Image (spheres, helix red, strand yellow):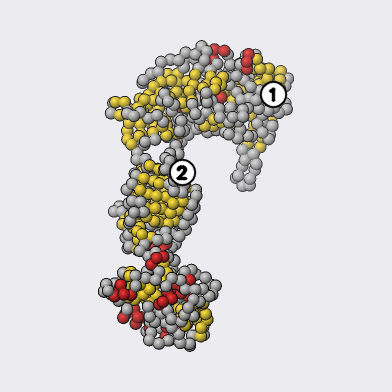
Amino acid sequence: MKKSINFLGALTIAAALTAGFTACTNEDNILEEQSAVQSSVYHVSIPANFGGAETRAVTFNETMASSTFATTDSVFVYNVTKNAWAHNGTKFLHLQPTNLADGGKSCTLSGDLTFCSYTPASYDITYVPPVWTPVTVDATDTYKLYYKAITGNGLTFYYDWQNGTQNEDHPAGDDDSDYSVSHCDFALADDVTMTLSGNTLTLDDHVRFTNYGSMFRQRLSFSKAGSPMTPAPTAIRYLYLTTEHKIFIDRDRLFDRYTGGREVRTDDEMILVGHPSVMDANGDVYFALAFDNTELQNGDKLTFMVEDYNGNVYTGGKLMPAAGLQNGKYYYGTLEMEWQSQRAVPTVTASDASPVLPDNIDNCFFIGNGATISGNSDGFFCYTEEEATVTLTGNGTATIENGYPFLIGAENLTINLASDYTIDVSNLSDDAISSWKNLYLMTTGGSHTLTITTSGSDDCGLYGKNYNSTNNGHETTTAVDVTSQLAAPGYTVTRSARVDGPDKDSDGEPDYYTWTYTVAPSPFTAAAVGKVIGADGNIYDDVATAEAAPTTALAMIAYVGAQPGICANGLAISLTDAYGYNATFAEATGNVIIPSWRIYHPITGGSWRLPSEKDWQYMMWGYYTDTPAAAPVGTIKSALTGGYYWTSTSIDEDNAKGIYYDGTENSSIQSLAKDGAWHVRAVFAF
């Protein structure tokens, strides 16, 4: 979008000062835009024109917009003396251009108006709604006339100053909701006194509108250490403006909407003028601001800070004129911006390897499934609205201080570590990566680490429904295996011991916490089902290979998968019964059979137990279900003989769950009498 202002006609421009601002020598009258008429008590008819010498035009999307009236324009009226708006008790009323002449450069503003003062709602004891009270005007009353100041039924002064666009829901008499800077200027006709004759208000002279706000065009150049910046920025992400004494007037509320004419100063130290095309190819930036010059002090300075898309930050400034920056004036000049620093900007690509640019205001990259984030990042964060796998690579370090996590997912989010990565959100945030649903970790190219430093300990730096302060065991400050909670299928995740910052906050808590998550490919894949585990904890293709190692083959891998509360990676079943003969339920669950098996058959990396109903179903069927009769999976059949096997799951005082295997294909969960004698097999989770 091209934004360059061209002034036509007899308009002279003073030379730009390097030490301060100089305004145009001509004041520029403002135009009007909006619509509709309401019948009321007073008929108003006022001549208005722009004057040929003051006509200006703006280049916008390669078209010219000149200052002319249109029948769709609106002018809103405020009676200063009576503190009353032109209002019918329901909505604001306005004047409308009629009798257009001279190509629209002159007209008569006319309309039928009533005037009402406003009493705000009261909430002291009970709610009292706001009241509009009709008032009678007098011949000596003075008025303010507002141009470009309404959306809907309330006076608001919102529009995007830099873009020159009005609220898209309320275009001002044009099919296109984008307007040039000229067509979107706020304007004010002040100290207007009209002649009252009966119920008619007229004016002998024409109404003269003046911009409310100072208009700027500054041509920026960029230098570093006194020499031109090479390459010079061709676009900037944003422009920040500051004054030493905070004299900006709130650009969204130039006037109080119901009391009229009361300026509202902003509390912001900075005003952001952000847009991808805020600077054109010549280095020109355009913006409009209003100032409270009553607060101006000698030596006050308007300071510019810009950042380009490579993270380079520049500053420059100019002294304010002694009388302040005036409404309705245009200020031109050149400004050298000196390089101050460079923020690290991560390289972010979409799934198709196309680059993604950060949002110009929030420092946010909007990404999707398959995106890659590479390298260091200073102050940026990423957000995806879809279920996504996002790759972190480039051995990057990300630092962010705005309170957001570095990476946010609205759906299930999987982080793929293609290298080690470090994220520091310790300034304001508890979470470095957050998913509104589930969060998983995986890796590419071997084992990698994700090191996270945060301001809080509860979430251990990561948040998802599957991993949060209620289930992540954050009270455990030593190293812990969190595979069952965080690992994507086929991977393992270990959380390191927590490292506390050396300093304490006001509550005596560490000022930061650090964890390192190690993510590695799991040795336990579906192909491992049927292989055996030796007493040394290693996996072997079969018993003979284990014995040749040499070690004792103790168990067969019967299931691979992470199941919370069941196993981190899978389940393995003993190759033989844990007792020389069949046993009752009390014996199977007592303190002899399984405890003795643990003692005489130790295994590295696991601990034997009597399998539960769920354990058996995962081992026999590969999933948990209440549906009986399913064939055993893999080669677990070779480890079993036909018959009934105890589970650790009790039904009632007399019965417990068992599993029946017919020795060929079929198996099912059965209810067995506890005093019956059945097979006892041991299982361990790994």
Q: Position of residue 73 (x, y in %)?
A: 63, 25
Q: What residue would you read off at disc 2?
A: 366
Quarter of the image for residue 172 reads top right
Quarter of the image for residue 67 reads top right
Tell me the residue at 69%/27% (across/down).
37
Up/down of 181 relative to 445, above or below: above
Nearer to the camera, 574 or 614:
574
Nearer to the camera, 417 or 7:
417
Q: What residue would you read off at disc 1?
A: 111
State the separation of the CA atoms marked 1 and 2.
49 Å
Up/down of 679 relative to 357, above or below: below
Q: Position of residue 272 (x, y in %)?
A: 45, 34
Q: Position of residue 161 (x, y in %)?
A: 50, 29
Q: Earlier in the sequence, mark 1 or mark 2?
A: 1
Amino acid marked by disc 1: Gly
Q: Position of residue 663 (x, y in %)?
A: 47, 80
Tell me the residue at 50%/25% (across/down).
213
Up/down of 647 relative to 439, above or below: below
Up/down of 204 relative to 528, above or below: above
| Contact? badges 1 and 2 (CB < 8 Å) | no
Quarter of the image for residue 570 reads bottom left
Tell me the residue at 52%/81% (across/down).
671
Nearer to the camera, 208 or 159:
159
Amino acid marked by disc 2: Phe
Q: Can residue 398 be seen?
A: yes
